[in-house]
Amino acid sequence: MSWITPDLIEILLSILKAVVILLVVVTCGAFMSFGERRLLGLFQNRYGPNRVGWGGSLQLVADMIKMFFKEDWIPKFSDRVIFTLAPMIAFTSLLLSFAIVPVSPNWVVADLNIGILFFLMMAGLAVYAVLFAGWSSNNKYSLLGAMRASAQTVSYEVFLVFP
């Protein structure tokens, strides 16, 4: 067992922490989406997502199966590489911004001295992902929508920097 070094253990622990953060973020997103759909159904006086299982308890599983079998549709004249890279950039910036959140005093994925600056940088990177998605679809309306969403996001970030 001489190949197990303290550096290797530290790397494996960092990978394990990153996987746990990934699972927590994805699970929270799924439950928040389910709760939002239930509340919107209640507010609009209609049935929410309660078709699968008792009271909709298996709706998350049904939605997950549905997402696995959805078609990955790319517009005909789009820039395929950037169009597929844009959601990956957005999701990566989301995960990296959660990596600086301490779970306990001894349990944090990335212990940075410049944590708030890193968070703001990741928020700025998500703006580029939206712009890339709008531009790469080769559609003027998608580009205008992406520019509008990016302008809104950047204008909201001003209040994060200057409280």
Image (tube, rainbow, N blue to C red):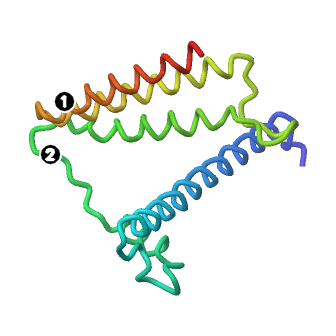
Residue underneath mark 2: 75
Q: Between 1 and 159, which is closer to the camera in this rendering?
A: 159
The percent position of residue 153, horizontal first and vertical second, equals 40, 27
Q: Secondary structure at mark 1?
A: helix
The percent position of residue 130, horizontal first and vertical second, equals 33, 32
Q: Is residue 51 above or below residue 117?
A: below
Residue at far bottom of view:
54
Q: How dense is the environment of label 2, judged by Cα within 10 Å: few (below 14), some, or many (20 and up)?
A: few
Q: How dense is the environment of label 1, judged by Cα within 10 Å: few (below 14), some, or many (20 and up)?
A: some
Using residue 150 as the reference point, say whether residue 59 is left or right of it. Answer: right
Rendered residue at 71%/30% (across/down): 110
The percent position of residue 133, horizontal first and vertical second, equals 27, 35
Amino acid type at circle 2 is Pro
Q: Secondary structure at mark 2?
A: loop
Rendered residue at 72%/48% (across/down): 16
The percent position of residue 94, horizontal first and vertical second, equals 52, 37
Using residue 130 as the reference point, say whether residue 104 is left or right of it. Answer: right
- Picture quarter containing residue 113? top right
Q: Is residue 116 above or below residue 52?
A: above
Q: In the image, which disc is placed on residue 117?
A: none
Using residue 84 as the reference point, say whether residue 96 is left or right of it. Answer: right
Amino acid type at circle 1 is Leu
Q: Is residue 24 above or below residue 45?
A: above
Residue underneath mark 1: 143
Q: Between 53 and 115, which is closer to the camera in this rendering?
A: 53
Q: Is residue 117 above or below residue 96?
A: above
The quadrant of the image that shows the C terminus is: top right
Find the distance from the CA under tag 2 to the CA under tag 1.
14 Å
Between disc 2 and disc 1, the foreground one is 1
- Pointer 2 and pointer 1: residues touching (CB < 8 Å)? no
Rendered residue at 69%/16% (across/down): 114
Q: In terms of sequence position, does the residue under pointer 2 or pointer 1 come before the other?
A: 2
